[in-house]
Image (cartoon, helix red, strand yellow):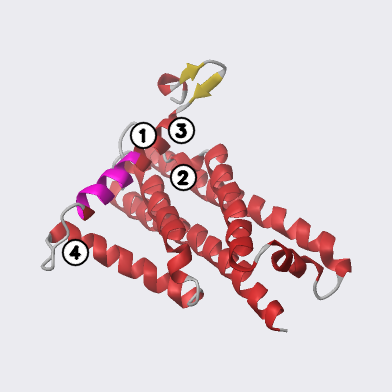
Amino acid sequence: MENEFSFAIGPVVIGASIMTTWGIMGVITLIAWLSTRHLEMLPGTLQTTVEGIVATIDEAIIAVAPEHGRQIMPFIASLWLFLIIANLVGLIPELHSPTRDLSVTSALAVLVFFSVHWFGIKTLGLKKYLHHYLTPSPILLPFHIISEFTRTLALAIRLFGNMMSLEMAAMLILLVAGFLAPIPILMLHIIEALVQAYIFGMLALIYLAGAMQSQQLNSQE
């Protein structure tokens, strides 16, 4: 299935997961443009829906990072929206969730990894940000470094494993039971897809908030 939708640009092979990812980003961009080009005081259905989604995400971010919500809102909101659509796109016939591909989840985890350091350095500067790796003792430096990489690896593998197992389980059940139980499987897929998107986005939010807020505590001390 992956090979049917792949093509090459020089030595680089573009597979189905990458094309699906590009398609999702295009859909999000199109919806954002359509919903913001004619904003009104009395919003229509589309504007009301988008405003409700943005408000819900904003409340979740403020609850974790009240002092930096506006700063990290664009990144976390974009990540959450992408993950929700990416996890649910597997319900469309002939398409698979790109998040069942380890390369995609690894790319997302690496993006979170660099974003944590970017926002941390941007908030308090390079010197103060790096100082927390030496606190409370320089002996803990290797453990801090290892934890940075292990939690990034865990992010990638957790999402990949859950989405891959979800699609495989649905496929096996359909092969055994046919279409006698499609609705329970469909509901399971939707719930699990939303849960996995929420967990990944929330962990990313916690990592960002921890990097930015812990630095403030250290600077105050």
Q: Residues within 10 Å of mark 4 (few under 14, many from 20)?
A: few
Q: Is 156 displayed left or right of 70 in the figure?
A: right
Magenta segment includes 187: no
For disc 1, the marked residue is 95
Q: Position of residue 26 (x, y in %)?
A: 33, 39
* In the depicted structure, whether residue 2 falls above or below residue 147: above
**Residue 167 vs residue 50: left or right?**
right
Alpha-carbon distance for marks 2 and 1?
A: 16 Å
- Residue marked by disc 4: 48
Quarter of the N terminus within the rendering: top left
Judge left or right: residue 207 versus residue 169.
right
Marks 1 and 3 close (CB-CB < 8 Å): no
4 or 2: tag closer to the N-terminus: 4
Marked residue nearer the N-terminal end (2 or 1):
1
Q: Please name which of the two marks, 3 or 2, marks the residue nearer to the observer.
A: 3
Mark on residue 18? 3
Quickly name the residue at label 2.
Answer: 169
Q: Amino acid at mark 1?
A: Leu
Q: Check disc 1 and report its element: helix, strand or loop.
A: loop
Does 153 appear above or below 171?
A: below
Q: Which residues are magenta?
A: 26-35
